[in-house]
Amino acid sequence: MMRIVIKVGTSTLAYASGRLNIRRVEALCKVLSDLKNSGHEIILVSSGAIAMGTGKLNLREKPADIPTKQAAAAVGQCELMYVYDKLFSDYNHTVAQLLMTGDDFHSEERHRNFNNTMTRLLEMDVLPVINENDTVATEECGVGDNDTLSALVAVSVKADLLVLLSDIEGLYTADPRCDPAAELIAEVRELTPEIMRLAGDAGTTLGTGGMKTKLQAAKLCVNAGCDMVISNGENPERLYDIIEGKCEGTRFYSNNSIIHNG
Ligand code: GLU
């Protein structure tokens, strides 16, 4: 049985309007509940607070200024937890909310408190739901993105596997949005400079599309002995195959990989 961190991106959880993608979130909670029932320890890192706040406050678009973004996150985080609490309760699972900033990982004391709380929650069979504490996080003290946050969490709790569910299939040899010859890379056994360069420079579509933070997350994970998978969150049922080591996206193997498939 594995300790698994699942990160879901905003595009998986919400429509462009910021309103909840009910079918998707219901499917996700069902699969995660089932995986928990089968004996795995599940930790969810969920984005979506700003998007849900944008939807709930009927803002025309995602706010650009920091105070409005933080206000939207404060509203959206409640909505997010309300939905998770409701859906996981249907399957008899209890959720806990943990809101983190970068400082919490840098300060030895706060990091220890986080680990102690996580250990106790997992012992109590609770499903922790983690997000950045967007209302207080700034560029200086924040983690900045949930790909990195989920990798920090996975490393802290010594997870076996981190799965990043996103709106892309995985890592490609080129940007699939503009290069039809781009091919999906199913397995990465070493994070060579060539692989790291596939994230693109900041400013390219691929780089701003989030591959940069995903590859940085992969580096944190594999260096700490945790496998990582990037996969499309469209169909949460894919998680069953991913956990069995079947490729459904791009898998980054650590030296301690618990999946031996060749
Ligand atoms: N914490 C942000 C939110 O909940 C998302 C950050 C991210 O997706 O990287 O809206």
Image (spheres, rainbow, N blue to C red):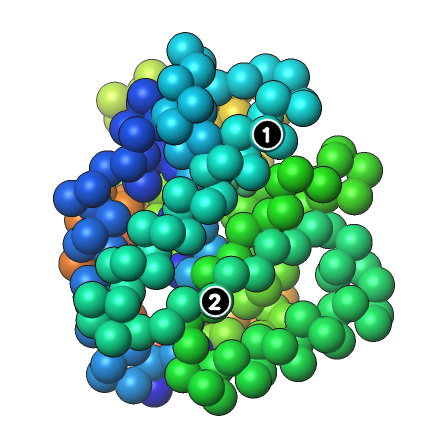
Q: Nearer the viewer, residue 232 or 98?
A: 98
Name the spot of residue 231 as percent of width and height, x first. 31, 49
Instruction: Decide if residue 222 is in sight here.
Output: no
Q: Is residue 138 above or below residue 111?
A: above
Asked whether mark 2 lies closer than 8 Å to ligand 1, one says no
Residue 222 percent coordinates (x, y)? 55, 65
Label 2: which residue? Answer: 96
Q: Could you say whether the residue bearing mark 1 is in a helix, strand or loop?
A: helix
Marking on residue 71: 1
Circle 2 sits in a helix, a strand or a loop, which is it? strand
The answer to whether 153 appears left or right of 232 in the picture is right
User: Residue 158 at x, y = what percent?
Assistant: 57, 77
Q: Position of residue 1 (x, y in %)?
A: 34, 86
Amino acid type, residue under disc 2 in the picture: Ala
Whether residue 52 sits left or right of residue 216 in the image: it is: left
Residue found 43% across the figure and 15% down from its top: 59
